[in-house]
Image (spheres, grey):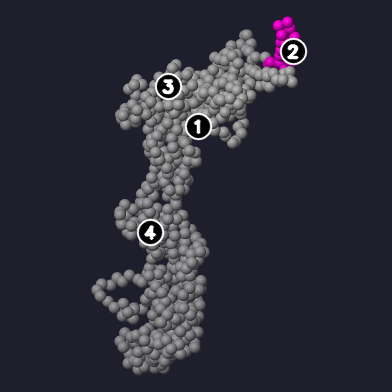
Amino acid sequence: MPGPPSHPSLSALMLAVLRLYEHRTNIDVWSFLLEPLRNLVPCEEVKIVVRCIAPPQVTSLGSHDREARRRVIAVTTVDRWPAERIEGHAALTQRIQVIPSQEAVRRNWDRYEVVQSHCDSPSAGRATCRACNVGGGLRCLAAVPLFDAGGNVLAVAKFVNRRIWSPDGQQQPSLEFSQLDLTMLSAFSAIFACVAPHPFLPLLGTGQLQRPQVKLLLGDYLMKVVLRWQVPVELRGQLCHEVCFGPVDHEDEFQGFAGPGRCQAREELQTVPCGYLEPLEDAGSELELTFEFEVPILHAGPDYAFSVRCRNQQMALEWSEPSMRVSTCLVPPYPEREGLRLTPLSESAVQLEWVPFRTCGELALVEYRVVAQAAPSLSREEAPSSPSASPTSPDEELGEQVVACFISDGSRAMEMTTVAYLQSNVSYTFAVEARYPHVGPRDFSRALRSECFCSPTADITLPAPQPLALDSASPVEVAARQGQSEASPPLLVRWPYPKDLSSQLVLQYRAATAAGLNRFQVSMWNTVPASASVEARLRLQAGGDPERLQLRLLRLNLAECTAIQLRVLMTQGRGRAASPPSAWFHPRPPARPQRLELQLRAQEAGLSLRCAWEQPLQIRAPVDEDVGPVAYAVQHDFSRGNGIQATRFQAQFREKQLLRVT
């Protein structure tokens, strides 16, 4: 009875293809292909060398020889293709390589191959066949590269010692592979590229992805981690990526966290699907693909570790080694230097100023919150001068109230806010708290605390600054000139204070704006900035020495107001005191006389000069209308020559010119 055919059959090819299709997503697909490939091209042994990321972990106990293990195991793995072996040369050239051949003789491939010949006949079982050992160890070998759809060599199948069936049903050794054998192996390699999924995840069954690299990015509106990892170039294609991260509470930076399915609780970890990602083009490596993904961090404070994995619709790889831990702890905003300046604006309002807080890293936005607390009723002599002098009790903390809250980017030289609706007879303490508005902990951190504050009292021994009734023709010598022209003319103010006291005084002003007929709206007290106040001296005669009179030249933009008042505030020393306010006056200088008429008359006593000009009517309220207190005070002060209708001029007589009016 004739034996099986000695040449490859189409049925054996179809059987190998069906077995490949059945286990194409199984990580042990190579083990399932051993028997079909031996039936496709009858040979003594079939070995498959699989490309993987890293060498597999050896699970056997005791000492062993790695090279001897590779010779007896049918499926082995390599992290890179060895160019000196036949399987490496077949993978690198992507062509079927055979022994014997001229290339095999030149590279001496047979020195790496050790063959254990055995026969598969039912009668012989696994015993060594005498006919198979006629030719000695290695007689012939064919290395067939197996591709995926992307052209990546996933594995190399090695067919060792071709055998043919004899007419009596026994297998006889053959010295080489026929052309029909190589054609059948080439056909199986082409079908394998069509059936095997791309990318082929079982390629990585014996290894894991590399440890991802992590970088923390801070922003005013978001805290995120930029995660970057590398995969072999064979995984190029439609592949999903997943990121798993969670907090770590140990000091070992290389340990990371226990990934899913390990000792750490599952609810402490978060999995973020990345979807389909495109590799970075500027990675600079031809053997690896680099991917990048941004993971937003919702809870700042703990240390995090990250792990990644790849998957498709059929299977998923194991999680990679955890990344180096990254800390998300943020230093809260803190003051660069201590100091909280309080400037009273009225009997019920105060202005707080402090230096902008320093921030962490690239953060710029800071959310400030001002808290006020009514202090116990103390006399001014007993009021503490420092926050540490009066510790706050738990009962007093209950009386705290948020009086201001705003977000600043730190672009201004001083942060300031106004607190209104204070009681004039109550002392207060203020505290400034800060946090980042969008990232970091949600609790405010208290950084500054003021001393006990109460509204200043009027000191009649402290004179008020008074404006000088001078026009544009008055000779004034300015100590420091300003190059830029102001929108409104300057104001001259008499400064009747000694120089040693001037450093402790703050000049303030408030404006009254007409809101209706005989109705004015008065602003709070505003502090005159140091750049708007310049020392000046008055010169009574042209070309003469200036008079020893201390003046201040104020440059304020008060074009729209009707009247202003001035006062000085003593902010240093024990307690606070303010001078009585000055009289209401109009900020603009007197206008020149309109339609001036001059008439020189000769009388018995001598010559007389008669001057006439137009004067606008004074703004007076109707008799039946009630005049408010501010309007009454403004009209009263304007009647003394400080109002809008005030007119002053000078007349000078010269030779050859009867009269000159300026």
Gap between marks 2 and 3, in whole Å?
55 Å
Looking at the rendered structure, the secondary structure element under dot 3 is: strand
Residue where numbered disc 4 is placed: 323
Looking at the rendered structure, the secondary structure element under dot 4 is: loop
The mark nearer the N terminus, 4 or 3, is 4
Which residue is located at x 46 percent, y 68 percent? 288
- Give the class, few, some or many, for how many residues have Cα within 10 Å of label 1's Cα (few <14, many ≥20): few
From this viewpoint, which residue is outermost toward the top? Answer: 604
By secondary structure, the bulk of the magenta-drawn segment is best described as strand
Mark 4 belongs to which amino acid? Answer: Ser
Q: Which mark is residue 577?
A: 3
Mark 2 belongs to which amino acid? Answer: Leu
The quarter of the rendered structure image containing the N terminus is bottom left
The mark nearer the N terminus, 3 or 1, is 1
| Picture coordinates of residue 319, whole percent (x, y) | 38, 61
Write down the region rendered in magenta.
593-616
- Give the class, few, some or many, for how many residues have Cα within 10 Å of label 3's Cα (few <14, many ≥20): many
Q: Is residue 238 magenta?
A: no
| Picture coordinates of residue 517, whole percent (x, y) | 62, 17
Placement of 145 over or under 127, stated as above or below: above
- For residue 33, which quarter of the picture? bottom left
Front of the two marks 4 and 3: 3
Gap between marks 4 and 2, in whole Å?
102 Å
Which residue is located at x 32 percent, y 55 percent? 264
Which residue is located at x 39 percent, y 32 percent? 431
Which residue is located at x 43 percent, y 48 percent? 361
Mark 1 belongs to which amino acid? Answer: Ala
Residue where numbered disc 1 is placed: 530
The quarter of the rendered structure image containing the C terminus is top right
Residue where numbered disc 2 is placed: 600
